[in-house]
Image: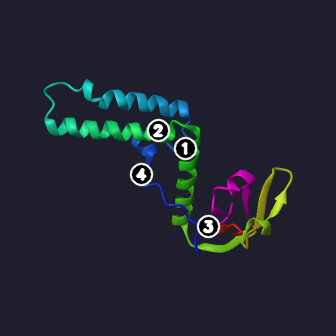
Amino acid sequence: MMAFKPAPKKDWYRILGADLYADVADLKQKYQKLVLMCHPDKQSTDVPAGMVEEYIQKFIEIDQVWKILGNEETKKEYDLQWHDNELQNMGPVDAQVYLEEMSWNEDDHSFLLNCRCGGKYTISKDEAEEVSLISCDTCSLIIELLNYS
């Protein structure tokens, strides 16, 4: 049984014209610029009706983006789902492991597992509660982190 979270349906960062590593301040600036540009009250009266409807839809979409990316918690959740989806699309899952099978690294407070290529799979304790896929730091292999039920 796979433990994948559903993939985010839209790339909210792309809609704002931001990259995945943008901070909230940068996102807010891009949001404010776009929302002003698409706000229905800012459209001139000679814009065709079809264009007005398009601006309204864009305005609603931008508002949805901000509700997700403008809040640290929902942004983190979205980012984790996006990361899981990207890993899933990278390649097949090489193995399924339980967190208890990984070694605890006291130095950087993370769990790790050696990959067959010589690289390592590492994950922090916080990430382990939310992320189900981990990629090797050296090769393209991926493991799926399972929870005891």
CB atoms of marks 2 and 1 within 8 Å: yes
Q: Magenta stretch containing residue 47, yes or no? A: no
CB atoms of marks 1 and 4 within 8 Å: no
Identity of the residue drawn at 58% across and 45% down: 76
Crowding around mark 4 (Cα neighbors within 10 Å: few <14, some 14 to 19, many 20+) is few
Q: Which disc number belongs to residue 74?
A: 1
Q: Nearer the viewer, residue 76 or 115?
A: 76
**For residue 121, what is the image quadrant?**
bottom right
Disc 4 or disc 3, which is closer to the eye?
Answer: 4
Disc 1 or disc 3, which is closer to the eye?
Answer: 1
CB atoms of marks 1 and 3 within 8 Å: no
Q: Is residue 61 above or below residue 37?
A: below
Q: Is residue 72 above or below residue 124?
A: above
Q: Nearer the viewer, residue 34 or 9?
A: 9
Q: Is residue 10 above or below residue 90?
A: above
Label 4 sits on residue: 10
